[in-house]
Amino acid sequence: MPTRTAIITGAARGIGQATARILQAQGLKVALIDRDADALAEATNALPGSLPCLCDVSQPDQVDQMAAEMTAKLGRVDVLINNAGVADFGPLEDTDFQRWRRVMETNLDGVFLCSQALLPALKSSRGAIVNIASISGLRASTLRVAYGTSKAAVIHLTQQQAVELGEFGIRANCVAPGPVRTKLAMAVHSDEIIAAYHDAIPLNRYGSEDEIAEVISFLASEKASFVTGQLIACDGGFEATGIGLPALRRQAE
């Protein structure tokens, strides 16, 4: 049986890198796609045997070149994980069109472009697409007019993919991470924000990159062979508390 393969965008750090590590440990050949050359080199060195490709997923020409190169080198593409994204937060009145487009072109356009470019290979393998959205695509939040809207669109795009591509045996699913304890998050989240998340999340903690990656790897695997068009919020129960007040939960205790 041929070795299964996976292409992971935004793979140089964070959730993408954790996913690549887990999939490689499961025996998949992984291709790491990122636009940060230095970080990509470090990630590739940390995962011997992985295939790096410098690519900005918001640029159609670069995506087409990446798809052709990685398909040739891998021989087949079983899994596409659309993880590349930018987190740009700001108020509506300060989000000019250029800033709006910068978020949309990576977070949404990149998912569309990579999925389309790799569709022939995915049809051939009857493969799987896993798109990475965010809890911000499910519930509105301060300063996330562009980011949250882009991730909501990714969730719907996933359903469109599942409906249209199911006849080719391609599954498409989506993971919406909640607050994750990344280096970036810990650098920008104040003690007050960390405490607020602790109170708002039923599990009373941030998630880890590996915890998100494990859910992604499940959806990418044959264990999820009859799962498509679905969204999994990997968020410690954050989405479930949409109408619950932390103060009331404490009172119930």
Image (spheres, grey):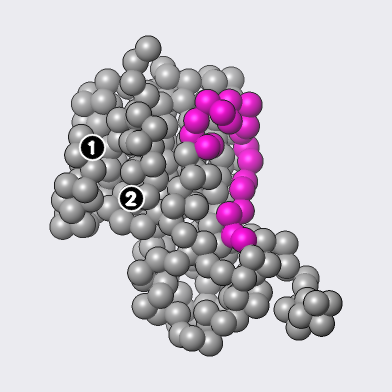
The span picked out in magenta is 218-236
> Camera-side residue: 52 or 165?
52
Quarter in which the C terminus is drawn: bottom right
Which disc, if any, is residue 50? Answer: 1
Q: Residue furthest right?
A: 252
User: How many numbered circles are shown?
Assistant: 2
Whether residue 21 is visible: yes
Q: Which residue is mark 2?
A: 17
Q: Is residue 153 visible?
A: no
Secondary-structure class at tag 2: helix
Please report the residue visible at 39 percent of the width from the left and 41 percent of the height from the top: 22
Q: Which callout, 2 or 1, points at the residue further toward the start of the chain?
A: 2
Q: Secondary structure at mark 1?
A: loop
Residue 59 image point, x, y percent: 29, 49
Quarter where residue 96 is shown: bottom left
Give the residue at x 49% y 45%: 214
Amino acid at the residue labelled 1: Ser
Q: Is residue 114 magenta?
A: no
| Vertical order, 63 against 212 (above or below) | above
Residue 229 located within the stretch drawn in magenta:
yes
